[in-house]
Amino acid sequence: MAQEREPVIQVKNLYKIYRVGHNKVRALNGVDLEIYRGEFCSIVGTSGSGKSTMLNMLAGLEKPTKGEVIISGEHLERMNENQLVKFRREHVGFIFQSFNLLGTMNAKENVALPLTFRGVPKKVRLDKADKMLDLVGLRRHKTHRPNEMSGGQQQRVGVARALVVDPEIIFADEPTGNLDSNTSAEVMELMKKIVREQNQTLVMVTHDNHLAGFADRIFHIIDGKIVKIEDNWKNREVAEG
Amino acid sequence: MEEMEEAQGGEEERSMSVKDLLKMSLSSLWRRKLRTILTVLGVVIGTASIVVMISLGLGLNKASMEQIEQYGGLTTITVYSNEGGYGYYGGGMAVSVDGSSDSESQEPVRIDDAAIEQFKHMEHVEVASPVLSTWVLLRQGVWENSASIRGMSREALEKMDLDIAEGSLPEEGGELQFFYGNTVITDFYNSKTGQNPFYENYDYENQDNYTLADVDLMNSPMFVIFDTDAYYNSQYGGTDENGAPIPAPKKYMVPACGLMAGKPTEWGENANSILCDVEALKAQLKKVFKGKAIPGQPTSKSGKPYKEIYYNQAYIRVDDMNYVTEVQDQIRALGFQAESNVEWMNQVQEQSRSIQMALGGIGAVSLFVAAIGIANTMMMSIYERTKEIGIMKVLGCDMRAIRNMFLAEAGFIGLIGGTVGLMLSYGISAIINFVTKATYASGISYIPVVLVLLAMIFAVFMGMLAGLFPALRAMRLSALAAIRNE
């Protein structure tokens, strides 16, 4: 248990202020949070609440205006772009709302792509991609292009691609936003299962309270501030206990 | 297995492999075939025009250099005596008189055996030979030829690398023997009609179709009249100072020792010379003009001939063309006049350099247009692939790898365009050479290997340069903005 309580993401007093014309918009207005290794967290809020900004900040895609983002002991706010790319390559997997698969590559090649950027030899990376696609249940679609697959299948490829590099943390931005509710539930269960099996940390952003409920902990964010943290973990322990 | 361990162990530091990078570049070019082909076509035309233009400049230069080679090569120096204001004798070639304009009061500097010895001992001088030439009349039957014979040392004759078709070089000393150049036979004319069969029937369309005088240089006896003045005077009824008619001078039979190789139409160094041993010629002249002034020889101020026979010229060959000017200056310092083809060559090269620059410039314009085409194609490609670039960046593709991928793409366009352009250049060059075959036998368009390599490197480099700005732009794309780009 002690091992699980080790914080892998720490956010301290984080601000992000956009300038829109003459107005300042506080997308994040002093956020503090800690996420532990092996946790499945969701950040939930309405559109414009700052949840996507939060995720971009955690992934090093945007620079904070003020505050600290510490992931695996490294300060993201101090890194330059090259270092951030390297950081993402080594620690992070991504799952997008619009899947963001490359249309010119088939499923297997898409999954193997992040390994290409790590200089993994072709045979090795295709083998790994193959196993990953088995894991997400796409045994029969390995050589299909994205436009030959359904949304759910495409997102499974997206999940496989995020997991193939064996990342410490997986960020998911509305991963089921483009899927119907049945498929959404399937994908959610899949993500949860795999993350649990591999003891990885998953941070998901969504506007859907129901989907957020799949997570161990739920951060509610309104107007750039965390207003409530639900802890399903404890609830579950209580329920199971 | 080892490979796998290495891949995993080294993951922290490893970035995209060069092979994968090039493969991705090629595949994205392949994806947009038509556009790639059109862009490549621009480079093809650019490369071909620059290469063909430069090849024309080089071909012209080569043709002039070959011409210089025919006129005695680049390592020979011709030395003339300096008559110090009296003008010089013999020869007949134009001589640059720099350094001798103040020679009015100067004693004449003439070429004798001592001077030849001096030349021989200069550094870098390979051969130094006296040249004694005199005009004679050759006769065989009705055929006559007024020709200049050229006496040189045996050593020089040997070192001139003459191509011998028949016989051998003249013997040193002893009896006078002639070694005929390959075009000498074209100068014989019929003494009765005054017609030269070679020039009367000259075929400008086909040089190999020629008619020659019926003269056998090697096997039939050749009669030589040395005292040509007396001969013409006797022919046309001239009289001496006492009014008595001048008797016909004595004819001498001179055997041939050899013939130079080559067609009668082939120009080359010494092709039109009649060569002989200088000592034999000297002895012969002394015998013929006993007690008289030898024509062409200098006389003292009182008009008396000198006892010694002076040479008209000296033939000097230097071991390397880079030392020609140096040796030439040394000889001039001794008071002689010295001439070589180096000045001519420098002039020719300067000229062809400027021609090359002008022609290359014209070609460069089209290559420049091609470069703009590449830049445009790459920009388009980046706009289209913004999202793809964003995804790659988010998935951890190195910024440098992204830049290199686009640079490689532009480089490939240059490489393919350059290769095809060079092939096209060879084709155009062959056509130009075929069309101009009549005027330039060895070809007016010349593509050396160096030009091929340079053109290749230049095309690739230019492609990458044109792709640099787009590539940097791709590298700096914001990953976040890029993935939001729908």
Image (cartoon, rainbow, N blue to C red):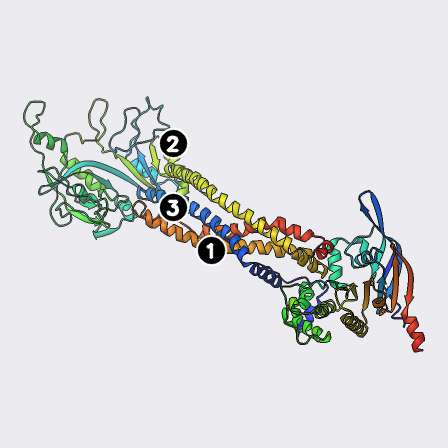
**Which chain letter goes with mark 2?**
B
Structural distance between the alpha carbons of marks 3 and 2: 37 Å
Q: Indicate the amino acid at tag 2.
A: Ala
Nearer the observer: mark 1 or 2; the answer is 1
Is B57 rendered above or below residue A2?
A: above
Task: Report whether B403 appears left or right of A222.
Answer: left
Structural distance between the alpha carbons of marks 1 and 3: 22 Å
Q: Residues within 10 Å of mark 2 (few under 14, many from 20)?
A: few
Q: Earlier in the sequence, mark 3 or mark 2?
A: 3
- Disc 1 vs disc 2: Cβ atoms closer than 8 Å? no
Residue B407 position, x and y percent, is 60, 54
> Which residue position is annotated with label 3?
B59
**Which chain letter goes with mark 3?**
B
Name the foreground residue: B397 vs B187: B397
The answer to whether marks 1 and 2 sit on the same chain is yes
Residue B242 position, x and y percent, is 7, 22
Please give the name of the residue rendered at 91% of the width and 66% of the height, measured from the top-left corner.
Answer: A230
> Which residue position is annotated with label 1?
B420
- Under circle 2, the secondary element is helix
The answer to whether marks 1 and 3 sit on the same chain is yes
Is residue B464 visible in this depiction of the protein?
no
Structural distance between the alpha carbons of marks 1 and 2: 56 Å
On residue B333, which mark appears?
2
Task: Report whether A192 appears left or right of B68.
Answer: right
Q: Farthest residue in the bottom direction?
A: A241
Task: Report whether B65 appears left or right of B202.
Answer: right
Name the foreground residue: A14 vs B213: A14
Is B390 rendered above or below residue B150?
A: below
- Under circle 1, the secondary element is helix
